[in-house]
Image (spheres, grey):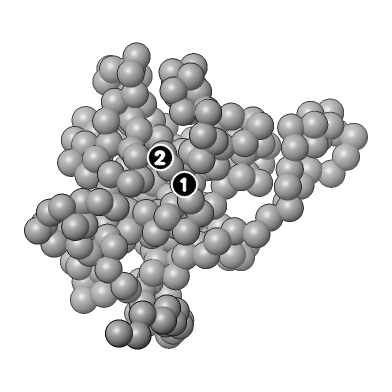
C-alpha cells in the first residue's frame, strides 16, 4: 500500500474560491464590504474608523470569499501576541487559555446581501459556510488550538453553538454580547463523528479553498510602544 503524501496543487482559475488576502486590493475590497453595513455578522458595531491605528493589524489574517471576481465575504483572524487579543472578556479568556498561546480571535465577519447562505456549485453552504471552512483549514495549518469570538446577535450565537462554540466561563449573553470559544479539535473531529454533510464539507479536499500559512517578521510589544509615540515607523 503506497501511502506517500503528495500535495495536490490548486488552480486559481475558478469562479468561486476562499483565500487569505495578500494584496492591498483584497483589503480595499473588504473595506468596501464593511462600508455598506452597520453591524457585522456577529451583531457587533462595524465602525472601522480606528483601522489605521489598529495595533493588532500585524497579527491579523484576512480570509475572503470571492465569487466571479468579486469579494463577497470576509473575516479577520487575530493571532494571540504580546498585545493579547481585542476580545471583550480578555480577563476570562486570558486566565483560561493564555497558557498555550495558540489562540486566535475571529472578528468582523461581513457578507454581501444575498450570498450568506446561497448555495453555489463550488460553495454548497454559501459564503458563511465557505468562511468557516477557510478559517478552520487555516487554523489547522497554523496549529491553532482555540478560536474565540465576541458575539451580540442571538441567531449568530446559536449558529456558532451548533458548530461547537461554547460560552467562556464567566461570561453570558446580554445586550453587550458574550464571548464564545471553540476547540479546533472539536470541530475537526465532527467530520468523522457525524453524518451531517456540513461537517464533512469542512474537512474534505476542495480546490476552492486556497488559504496560506502566513510568513511575517516577528513584532514585539516594544515595537508598538515606540510606534505609538511616533518615533519610528509602524510595521506593515
* Residue plotted at (51% across, 40% down): 102
- Residue placed furthest toward the top: 170
Residue 50: percent from left, percent from top: 60, 35
- Residue placed furthest toward the right: 231
* Residue plotted at (36% across, 80% down): 3
Q: Quadrant of residue 221?
A: top right
Q: SS at mark 1?
A: loop
* Residue plotted at (41% across, 81% down): 4
Q: SS at mark 2?
A: strand
* Residue plotted at (33% across, 38% down): 182
Query: As drawn, is 30 to the left or to the right of 111?
Result: right
Residue 38 at least partly seen: no
Q: Determine whether 174 is above or below 209 in the image.
A: above
Residue 15: percent from left, percent from top: 35, 79
Viewer-proximal residue among 176 and 135: 135
Q: Which residue is mark 1?
A: 144
Q: Quadrant of the N terminus?
A: bottom left
Viewer-proximal residue among 132 and 48: 132
Mark 1–mark 2 Cα distance, whole angstroms, equals 8 Å
The label number, if any, that marks residue 54 in the structure image = none
- Residue placed furthest toward the left: 195
Residue 148: percent from left, percent from top: 40, 35
The label number, if any, that marks residue 147 in the structure image = 2
- Crowd around label 1: few <14 · some 14–19 · many ≥20 (10 Å): many
Q: Determine whether 110 is above or below 19 in the image.
A: above
Viewer-proximal residue among 180 and 101: 101
- Crowd around label 2: few <14 · some 14–19 · many ≥20 (10 Å): many
Q: Are marks 1 and 2 in contact (CB under 8 Å)?
A: yes
Amino acid at each position: 500500500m503506497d501511502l506517500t503524501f503528495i500535495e495536490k496543487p490548486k488552480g486559481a482559475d475558478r469562479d468561486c474560491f476562499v483565500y487569505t488576502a495578500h494584496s492591498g486590493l483584497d483589503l480595499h475590497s473588504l473595506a468596501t464590504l464593511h462600508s455598506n453595513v452597520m453591524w457585522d455578522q456577529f451583531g457587533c458595531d462595524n465602525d472601522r474608523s480606528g483601522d489605521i491605528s489598529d495595533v493588532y493589524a500585524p497579527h491579523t489574517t484576512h480570509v475572503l470569499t470571492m465569487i466571479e471576481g468579486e469579494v463577497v465575504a470576509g473575516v479577520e483572524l487575530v493571532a494571540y501576541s504580546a498585545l493579547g487579543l481585542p476580545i471583550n472578556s480578555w480577563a476570562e479568556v486570558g486566565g483560561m487559555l493564555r497558557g498555550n498561546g495558540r489562540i486566535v480571535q475571529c472578528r468582523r465577519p461581513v457578507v454581501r446581501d444575498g450570498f450568506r447562505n446561497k448555495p453555489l456549485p463550488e460553495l454548497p453552504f454559501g459564503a458563511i459556510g465557505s468562511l468557516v471552512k477557510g478559517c478552520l483549514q487555516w487554523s489547522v495549518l497554523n496549529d491553532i488550538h482555540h478560536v474565540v469570538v465576541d458575539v451580540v446577535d442571538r441567531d449568530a450565537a446559536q449558529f456558532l453553538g451548533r458548530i461547537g462554540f461554547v460560552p467562556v466561563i464567566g461570561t453570558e449573553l446580554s445586550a453587550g454580547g458574550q464571548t464564545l470559544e471553540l476547540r479546533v479539535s472539536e470541530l475537526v473531529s465532527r467530520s468523522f463523528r457525524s453524518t451531517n454533510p456540513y461537517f464533512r464539507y469542512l474537512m474534505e479536499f476542495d480546490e476552492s479553498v486556497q488559504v496560506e500559512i502566513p510568513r511575517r517578521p516577528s513584532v514585539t510589544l516594544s515595537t508598538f510602544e515606540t510606534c505609538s509615540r511616533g518615533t519610528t515607523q509602524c510595521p506593515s
